[in-house]
Amino acid sequence: MQEDSFFKTAQELDKTDSLATYKNHFITTDNLIYLDGNSLGKLPKKTVEINKDLIENQWGERLIQSWNENWLNLSGNIAKKLAQILGADESEILVGDSTSINLYKLAFAALNAQGNKTKIVTDSLNFPTDLYVFQGLIANHFKNHNLEIVESTNNISVDTQQIEKVLDNNTALLSLSLVTYKSAYLYPMKTINEIAKKHNTLVLWDLSHASGAIPVNLHKNNTDLAVGCTYKYLNGGPGAPAFLYVKKELQERLTNPIWSWFGHEKPFDFSINYTPSNSIQKFATGTPTIISMAAIEPGLEIILQAGIENIRKKSLEQTTFLINLIKHYLEPLNCVIASPMNANERGSHISVQHNEGYRINRALINPKNKTAPVIIPDFRPPNNIRLGIAPLYISFTDLYVAVKRIEEIIKTKEYEGFSLEKLTVT
Ligand SMILES: *Cc1c(COP(=O)(O)O)cnc(C)c1O
């Protein structure tokens, strides 16, 4: 029977999976399959200990002495680990603020540095916050600039030629998500960077859906600028500080639009006039959020131990396996795969579309039969069920079970027990 053959394959793949034990580094819940690690990663066990010590000892006992003892070095220590994962130098990464704020700071700096060039290019697959940041920069400051949004013709990917066509010598900035949030389309970073160089266009990548899932290789790909979150595949915790990357050669040319004391060359001289630091620190904005920052480190350590190349390898095997399962069990039930079929063009999640996508998602999370596994993916309008694969804690059998549950929900119309009214966070 086909069913058995997929199940058997899943079990065999799990047996030979060299990353199989990494799930033990995370807090787990019985009978729960978590397919939303691309939105909020799981909690590493070590984070619980570290934050307990931070709150009870460092804050509770040592109080302000902890700034010198632990806290001032914290963002640098985290940048060092992140730099290894992203293929950059630690002197090019700053941890802090949200992705949106970092995007604003670097886009502002890039547009300023580009003088009279007035075109900003992005695509229709980009995350809304990115589009809003560019719209706001134009509305509030760069009033002569215009934003050109390259349209995806299939809502899955954008051809490199489409990007190439709109870039010209007036293009100041090109900004894209390396892995797009809905379809998981993965841009050919190096090629795009090379095309942009021909026009002296600066490229700002949003790595939110890529960091921790694929080797980004910022240096190898000759990347100018990047930002990204740490709470997705990096498992840093809800609202964990984001990061920004500025290539060494660009650091002198770019200026942080928000001048603050933590970006000053000598913050603790308390000078009246602003002199920016000549390091990546010049892009800081005020006092770092220590409690949420400390929570990032254990997740990075797990990734470094597992190896980002190994994570990518397993991720590709898993997205391929998942696509085969969907083709076999779900396509006959009117499901459509809305992610790239070519493995080299996708990140680590697969979007499946169905007219009842929202309610199928609700039924996966709240099964009618209480002994059925709870499966948590997420939903993105209009009808995408996003199945996120975090290879550190997802098994091949998990994917099999999830697809079989979706099949059951559709076949038995279990989703009819749920309201069409959407929750705020989907
Ligand atoms: C998740 C995500 C963000 C989130 O930005 P915040 O400022 O942390 O809310 C931004 N961009 C992309 C591409 C994302 O996937």
Image (cartoon, helix red, strand yellow):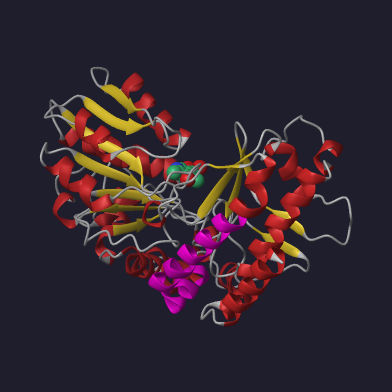
Q: Is residue 28 left or right of residue 108?
A: right
Question: If the image is split into quadrants, where does the C terminus sit?
Answer: top right
200 shown above or below 232: above
Question: If the image is split into quadrants, where does the N terminus sit?
Answer: bottom right
| Percent position of residue 201, x then y | 17, 37
The foreground one among 1 and 162 is 1
Q: Is residue 375 left or right of residue 112?
A: right
Residue at position x 67%, y 63% in the image = 400
Q: Tell me which corner region of the image, top left, top right, bottom left or bottom right, holds residue 257.
A: top left
Say how many tags the image has. Answer: 0
130 shown above or below 340: above
88 shown above or below 369: below
| Percent position of residue 362, x then y | 76, 43
Q: Is residue 231 magenta?
A: no
The foreground one among 64 and 25 is 25
Residue 275 appears in view: no
Considering every residue shown, the one lying at the far front of the view is 1
Residue at position x 72%, y 57% in the image = 404
Q: Is residue 313 magenta?
A: yes
Q: Tell me which corner region of the image, top left, top right, bottom left or bottom right, holds residue 412.
A: top right
Residue at position x 60%, y 82% in the image = 15
**Magenta-drawn stretch, dominant element (helix, strand or loop):** helix
| Percent position of residue 324, x then y | 56, 57
| Percent position of residue 280, x then y | 26, 56
Residue at position x 67%, y 53% in the image = 329
Q: Is residue 182 left or right of residue 197?
A: right
Residue 406 appears in view: yes
The stretch in magenta equals 298-325
The foreground one among 337 and 349 is 337
